[in-house]
Amino acid sequence: MLSDRALAAFRSALGAERVFDDAATRALYACDETPRRVEPDAVLFPTSHDEVAAVVRIAFEHRIALTPRGAGSGNVGGALPSPGSVVVSFECMRRVLEFDPANRLIVVEPGVVTEEIDRLARGAGLFYPPDPGSSAYCRIGGNLAMNAAGPRAVKYGVTRDYVLGLRAVTGDGREIRTGCRTTKGVTGYDLTRLLVGSGGTLALITEATLKLLPAPEAVATLRVCFAGNHSALDAVGRVMHQSVMPCALEFMDHRAIDAIRPTGAADDLPPGTRALLMVEADGATADLPRQIAALEAALAGDGLLETKSGFTRDDITRLWAARKSLSHAVKQIAPLKINEDVVVPVSELAGFVDFIDHTANAHRLAVVSFGHAGNGNLHVNLMVHPDDADEMERAHLALDAIMLRVLSLGGTLSGEHGIGTEKRRFVPREIDPVTLDLMRAIKRQFDPHGLLNPGKLFPD
C-alpha cells in the first residue's frame, strides 16, 4: 500500500478531492475489458499537464508504479494495474485546447472522447479519420497509446498517421514536446511516432496536436453476400488491386453469420450466405456511382450471391445492421471472448481463415472471425467458458497455433489493439533478441526505474 507520505504528496499536488484510495474506487479501476483484475493502491485524477508532471515526479521519488488509463475500453490489458501501482486516470483532462480549421489541426487533452473530435471537425467541413469501434466512448489518450484504428484505416490509415506533435512527461518527470504543427518536418528523431503505440510505457501524453482532413461529401455502401469464405476473400484481393480505394472493407465469416441469426439481423440475407463483405466508398457525391460500379465489378466472381447498395443514410444503416449486431451476438455464445486482432498479408487471408476453421474444429471451440479485410486485419474471437478448465486449455493451445501461423505467413500479432499484458508472451516470436534489447534500452532512457505501465508490451 501507499505510504502516508506519498499519499499526502499526491493530495498536495492534486487536491484531496482527486486522490482516492477507498476500496470502492480501487475496485472500479481494477480492470479494463480483459477478465483479469488487479486493484491499484490508489486512483488519481489530474486535470492539467502540470499536475501530471507533479504526479510523475512524486512517483519517481517514491518509486511508485503508474498505470495510465483513458476509458478502460481496451481488451489486451493495457490499462490493467500492476500490483502496487497507482492508476492515473485522464478522464478529467478533456479540454480542446485549440481548433484551427484554417490549418486543419486540433490540439486536445488525452481525456477527450474520440468521436467528439470528429464531431467538432465536421462542423467546419473537416473530419478526423481514425474510427475505432469504441469511438463513442473511448478517449484519444488510449487511442494514442495503442495506435488505434478502425474500418476507415484501409483508406485513411491509423492514429499514428494523424498525430503532428505531442506534449508528454517521461518516467523521471521530464517534460518533452515532440513533432511540429506542420504536415512536413524532419528535424531530429521522430519521437512522436515512437510514443504513439508505446502503450504508456515511455511517457504520459498530456496534449496531442492532430491532423484533420477535408470531410468527404458523401458515402455509399455495398453489402455483398458470398457462398463461402474463399469467394469473399478472393474478392477482397480483387478490390485491393483496382484503382478505387474503398474507405471500408469489412469481412464476416460463416460463424459470425450464424451468431447473428438468432437476433434476426440475418433474415434478409439470401439463402446459402456463408460470408459477408461490407464495402464503402466516399468522396464527391457526383463521383460515387462511378466508384460503386468499379467496386461491384471487382467484387463479381465465383460464389457471389447478392450485392445490395445504399446511397442514403437510412439505406446505409439497414445494410450495416448485420455487422453492427455482431458484437452483442457473439457474447451469447459464451461468457468470455478471447479477442485477437492479428494481421496477415491480404493474399494470405483465405488460407488463414481456413486454418482458423481447422483449428477451431480440432480443438472443439467456437471461433468467430471478422474484421478489416482490406488491411488483412482479422479479429479472431475464441468464445469460451472460463470455469471450464478443459476448454480453457484447448483455447490456449488453439491460440498458440493461430499466433504461430500468423507469424509464419509474414503477419503481426496486433493491428490496432496493442500488446498490453495479454500478448506479451508472444512478442519474442515476432521480434528478435537484438531488436528487443534496443527497445528495452529505449524504455530505460525514457523511464529509468520502469515505473510507467510496468508488465506491459515486453515479456519479463
Image (cartoon, rainbow, N blue to C red):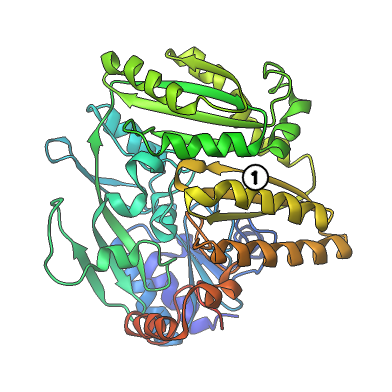
Is the residue 1 above or below the residue 109 in the image? below
User: Up-down: is 128 above or below 3?
Assistant: above
Of 109 and 260, nearer the camera is: 260
Q: Quadrant of the C terminus?
A: bottom right
Which residue is located at x 62 percent, y 67 percent? 404
Is 117 drawn above or below residue 295 in the view shown?
A: below
* Figure disc tally: 1
Q: Is residue 297 left or right of residue 180?
A: right
Q: Residue at x 41, y 39 (%)?
A: 240
Give left or right: position of 83 versus 145: right
Query: Does residue 104 appear left or right of residue 376 in this picture?
Result: left
* Quarter location, residue 126: top left
Point out residue 114 in the picture as x, y percentages from the top left corner.
40, 43
The kind of residue tagged 1 is: Ser
Single out the residue that lies furthest toward the front.
302
Secondary structure under tag 1 reads strand
| The N terminus lies in quadrant | bottom right
Kindly indicate the quadrant of the structure image that contains residue 423.
bottom right
Q: Residue at x 14, y 53 (%)?
A: 181
Where residue 303 sits, quadrant-wise, is top right
Residue 45 image position (x, y, % from top left): 45, 60
Q: Position of residue 271 (x, y in %)?
A: 73, 19
Identity of the residue drawn at 54% across and 23% down: 223
Residue 124 appears in the rendering? yes
Residue position marked by numbered label 1 in the rendering: 369
Other-residue count near label 1 (Cα within 10 Å), few / some / many at <14 / 14–19 / ≥20? many
- From the viewer's side, name the closer residue of 57 and 155: 155
Q: Decide if residue 98 is in sight here.
A: no
- Residue 133 lies, with reference to residue 457, above or below; the image says above
110 on left or right of 274: left
x, y percent for residue 217: 28, 21
